[in-house]
Image: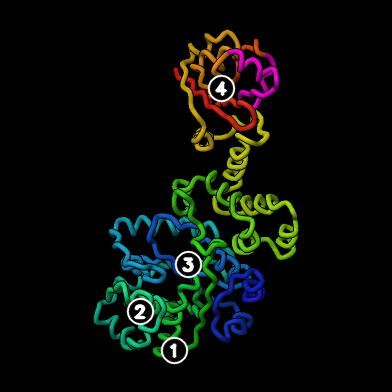
C-alpha cells in the first residue's frame, strides 16, 4: 500500500486530518467514503477534485465508497450557502441520482480486487426510519451546543437557518455511523467546508458505539483571486457532455491562468511528482496547459472526445488540414464558429460565381470583401484561405469541397474568419 496522506500532502490536497488517521491507514486496507448530493443531474469540476481524493485513496490500496445522497439531497447541505436551497422534486432527484452514479462509475475501479469501489445511496437506510426513531437514534447523542458550534451553522444564523438545514449534520453524521456499523467504514473525506459535518459523524460513532473513526478534508479549489474555480461565463463546467461540450471542457483547461497551473496539475491529474516538476519547469506554460487539458478531457470524456476537441481547437488559428476538418462533428464545428460571421448562400449562387474573386465579393454581398479589387489584391498577397487552403490565384474556380457538405470557412488574413453556409 502507498502512504495516502503523504500522496495528498505533496499534491496540496490535504486541509484537515484527524490525529491518528495516517497511522491507521498505513496499518491496513480501510474503507472510506465521500458523499455527493444529487442537486443537479451532473457533477462539475469542483466535485471532480473530491472524486480525485477517492481515486488516490483506491490507488493507495484502500476501498473507496461513493455515497449518492438520495435522502440528504431532499434537504440540501447549508455548508457554504448564504441562503436555503430550494427543494427538488422526487422525480428530479431520481434523475440526478442516476446521472451522478453513471459519472462516478467512470473514475473508479468497481470490478477488481478486495478494494473495488462501491456506490451506496443513503435513501436505502433512511427510507424506513421514522421521525421519532431518528431522534432516538441520532438526535439524543449530539447536543444543540455542539451542533451550533459548527461553522456551517454559525455563518447562517444572521441570515436565518431552518430546522431542516440545521438537522443536515445529523443526517450526514448518521450516514457515517451507518456505514461504520454495516460496511466497516472508518474514514469520511470531503472538501474543507465539510469538516463540521464529517466530525459530527465521528462524534456520533464515538458516543453510540464507543468506536473510533477518522476525518479528512481537502482544500476547496479556488482561483488565484479567491473566487470559485470551475465557473465560466456560462456557469459551471459540468462533467456531462450535454451540459458542457468536450470542446468547451477542453478549452476551459487550456485557458486556465498561468498562476493556477501547478496546483491544478497536482489535483486533477494522476501525473507523478517528477512529471509535474518537469511541466512546471518548462518555460512554455502552454505545454503544461496542453498536458492538463488532455489528461482531464480523456479521463472525463474519452480519447476520441479529446482528439475531436483538439482538432476543433486548431480549426481557426491552428494548422488543421481540410481532411482533419472533415473529421470534426458538425455540432463541435458550429460551436467553434459560433462567434464567426455567417453568410448564407444557395448552391445555385455558389455555382454561379465565375471565379473566387466574384465569390468573395459580389456573390457574398460584399460582406467579406467590399470590392473585387480588394479581394484580388489580398489573394495575390497570399492572405486568403478557404477551408484552410490558401487561394493561389484570383481566377481560381470555386470548386472547394464543402465541410459537412454545407460549409465553407473563409479566412481573410490571419484573424478574420467568415462561415459561408450553403443551403439547398
- Between label 4 and label 3, give the one nearer the viewer: 4
Spatial CA span between label 3 and label 2: 19 Å
Q: Which residue is mark 4?
A: 402
Residue 33, image x and y in percent? 49, 72
CA distance separating discs 2 and 1: 14 Å
Colouring scheme, one of rainbow, by chain, secondary structure, one colour: rainbow
Please give the name of the residue rendered at 39% of the width and 89% of the height, measured from the top-left corner. Answer: 208
Which image quarter: residue 173?
Answer: bottom left
Residue at image x 52%, y 64%?
226
Q: Magenta residues, as a range?
A: 372-393
Taking 161 as reference, is 378 left or right? right
Q: Is residue 342 above or below residue 338?
A: above
* Residue 206: assigned label: 1
- Decide if residue 38 is on the left or right side of residue 347: left
Q: Secondary structure at mark 2?
A: helix
Q: State the mark number for residue 291.
A: none
Dot 4: what SS? loop
Q: Does the magenta portion include 385?
A: yes
Q: Which residue is mark 2?
A: 170
Category of crowding for the residue at label 3, using alpha-carbon neighbours closer than 10 angstroms: few (below 14), some (14–19), many (at least 20): many
10 Å neighbourhood of mark 1: few (<14), some, or many (≥20)? some
Q: Nearer the viewer, mark 3 or mark 2?
A: 2
Amino acid at each position: 500500500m502507498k502512504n495516502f496522506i503523504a500522496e495528498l500532502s505533496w499534491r496540496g490536497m490535504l486541509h484537515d486530518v484527524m490525529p491518528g488517521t495516517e497511522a491507521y491507514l498505513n496499518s491496513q486496507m480501510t474503507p472510506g467514503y465521500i458523499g455527493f448530493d444529487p442537486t443537479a443531474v451532473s457533477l462539475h469540476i469542483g466535485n471532480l477534485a473530491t472524486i480525485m481524493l477517492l481515486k488516490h485513496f483506491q490507488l493507495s490500496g484502500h476501498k473507496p465508497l461513493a455515497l449518492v445522497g438520495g435522502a440528504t439531497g431532499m434537504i440540501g447541505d447549508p455548508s457554504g450557502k448564504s441562503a436555503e436551497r430550494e427543494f427538488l422534486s422526487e422525480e428530479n432527484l431520481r434523475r440526478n441520482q442516476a446521472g451522478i452514479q453513471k459519472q462516478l462509475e467512470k473514475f473508479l475501479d468497481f470490478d477488481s480486487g478486495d478494494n473495488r469501489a462501491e456506490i451506496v445511496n443513503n435513501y436505502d437506510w433512511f427510507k424506513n426510519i421514522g421521525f421519532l426513531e431518528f431522534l432516538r437514534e441520532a438526535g439524543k447523542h449530539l447536543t444543540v451546543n455542539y451542533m451550533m458550534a459548527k461553522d456551517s451553522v454559525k455563518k447562517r444564523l444572521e441570515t436565518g437557518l431552518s430546522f431542516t438545514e440545521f438537522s443536515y449534520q445529523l443526517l450526514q453524521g448518521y450516514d457515517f455511523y451507518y456505514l461504520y456499523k454495516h460496511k466497516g467504514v472508518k474514514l469520511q473525506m470531503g472538501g474543507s467546508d465539510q469538516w463540521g459535518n464529517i466530525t459530527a459523524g465521528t462524534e456520533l460513532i464515538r458516543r453510540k458505539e464507543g468506536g473510533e473513526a477518522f476525518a479528512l478534508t481537502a482544500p476547496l479549489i479556488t482561483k488565484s483571486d479567491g473566487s470559485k474555480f470551475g465557473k465560466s461565463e456560462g456557469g459551471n463546467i459540468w462533467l456531462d457532455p450535454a451540459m458542457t461540450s468536450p470542446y468547451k471542457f477542453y478549452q476551459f483547461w487550456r485557458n486556465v491562468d498561468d498562476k493556477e497551473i501547478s496546483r491544478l496539475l497536482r489535483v486533477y491529474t494522476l501525473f507523478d511528482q517528477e512529471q509535474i516538476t518537469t511541466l512546471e519547469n518548462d518555460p512554455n506554460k502552454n505545454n503544461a496547459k496542453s498536458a492538463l487539458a488532455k489528461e482531464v478531457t480523456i479521463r472525463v470524456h474519452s480519447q476520441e472526445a479529446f482528439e475531436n476537441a483538439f482538432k476543433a481547437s486548431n480549426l481557426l488559428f491552428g494548422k488543421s488540414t481540410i481532411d482533419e476538418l472533415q473529421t470534426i462533428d458538425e455540432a463541435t464545428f458550429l460551436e467553434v464558429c459560433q462567434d464567426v460571421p455567417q453568410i448564407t448562400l444557395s448552391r445555385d449562387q455558389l455555382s454561379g460565381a465565375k471565379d473566387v474573386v466574384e465569390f468573395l465579393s459580389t456573390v457574398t454581398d460584399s460582406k467579406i470583401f467590399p470590392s473585387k479589387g480588394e479581394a484580388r489584391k489580398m489573394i495575390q498577397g497570399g492572405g486568403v484561405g478557404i477551408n484552410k487552403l490558401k487561394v493561389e490565384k484570383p481566377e481560381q474556380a470555386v470548386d472547394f469541397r464543402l465541410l459537412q457538405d454545407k460549409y465553407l470557412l473563409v479566412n481573410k488574413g490571419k484573424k478574420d474568419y467568415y462561415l459561408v453556409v450553403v443551403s439547398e
